[in-house]
Amino acid sequence: MSKQDTIINIKDVWKTYKMGDVAVHALRGLDLEVKEGEFLAIMGPSGSGKSTAMNMVGCLDIPTKGSIYLSKQDISTMTESRLAQIRGKKIGFIFQKFNLINTLTAKENITLPMMFQGITPEERLRKAEELLDMVGLADRKNHRPAELSGGQQQRVAIARSLANDPEVVLADEPTGNLDTKTGENVMTFLEKLHEEKGTTIVMVTHDEDVAKHADRVEHLRDGAIVKTRKNKHR
């Protein structure tokens, strides 16, 4: 796949939820294209549909209407078991609340996604230690989440998202639970990951300062894109 290829293509996607007798349209004909190696930010006020859009890209939900292509595969009609396979192999997730397992060490949290892909225990441990070194936490590998700062937990979450060499990393408000300085450090790391490894990153954020790290910013309102902006410094 060349850098010019489209890795995500969302075509006329609608997502409608039934609330009693009322139909609530979270997405209204969303069209979105993401190129291989791009860093995209999705912004919008609460209720704009940005989290629903993230769920569509992340194979966490399927549209009511429309098509979603990930690496040229139409995921909008797949079964849940097939979606789970796609998620495990092609997509890495970074969440606002870190979503680390409190009873596991940093290293064990990172090895967990690899267990479901049939990777040997030796390879899992090797890869986890390599990723911890990459995020600057090699000396914290045996610490549990409660023994780590918020910024350290988010770096473990970033390392975990890369465990299976995903084609796309989805970051949902990755700095939302961090102070400004720590959040900036996390964004600098994501930017470095994008630039040095060419990782495709799709990020949801409400923070303009965070969105500035992306190549392109798509503004959502009422379930559709209302404005597109390219960041000049990128």
Image (cartoon, rainbow, N blue to C red):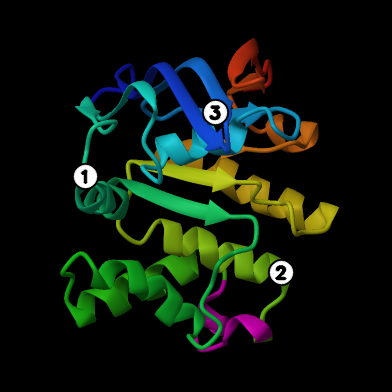
**Residue 27 drawn in magenta:** no
Tell me the crowding category of disc 1: few under 14, some 14 to 19, or many 20 or more residues within 10 angstroms, Cα based. Answer: few
- Inspect the image, locate mark 1, and give the three-letter code of the amino acid beneath it: Thr
Tell me the crowding category of disc 3: few under 14, some 14 to 19, or many 20 or more residues within 10 angstroms, Cα based. Answer: many
- Inspect the image, locate mark 3, and give the three-letter code of the amino acid beneath it: Leu
Q: Earlier in the sequence, mark 3 or mark 2?
A: 3
List the residue tagged with mark 2. 150
Residue that appears at 17% across and 76% down: 120
Q: Secondary structure at mark 1?
A: loop
**Residue 138 drawn in magenta:** yes
List the residue tagged with mark 1. 79
Q: CA distance from mark 3 to mark 2?
A: 24 Å
Asked if the residue under mark 2 is in contact with the one under mark 1, i.e. CB atoms within 8 Å, the reply is no
Image position of 169 with respect to 181: above or below:
above
Image position of 139 with respect to 52: above or below:
below
List the residue tagged with mark 3. 40
- Inspect the image, locate mark 2, and give the three-letter code of the amino acid beneath it: Gly
How far across and down, in percent of the image, does residue 204 sit? 61, 37
Residue that appears at 82% across and 55% down: 181
> Relative to 180, is 99 on the left or the right?
left
Displayed quadrant of residue 147: bottom right
Nearest to the observer: residue 97 or residue 129: 97
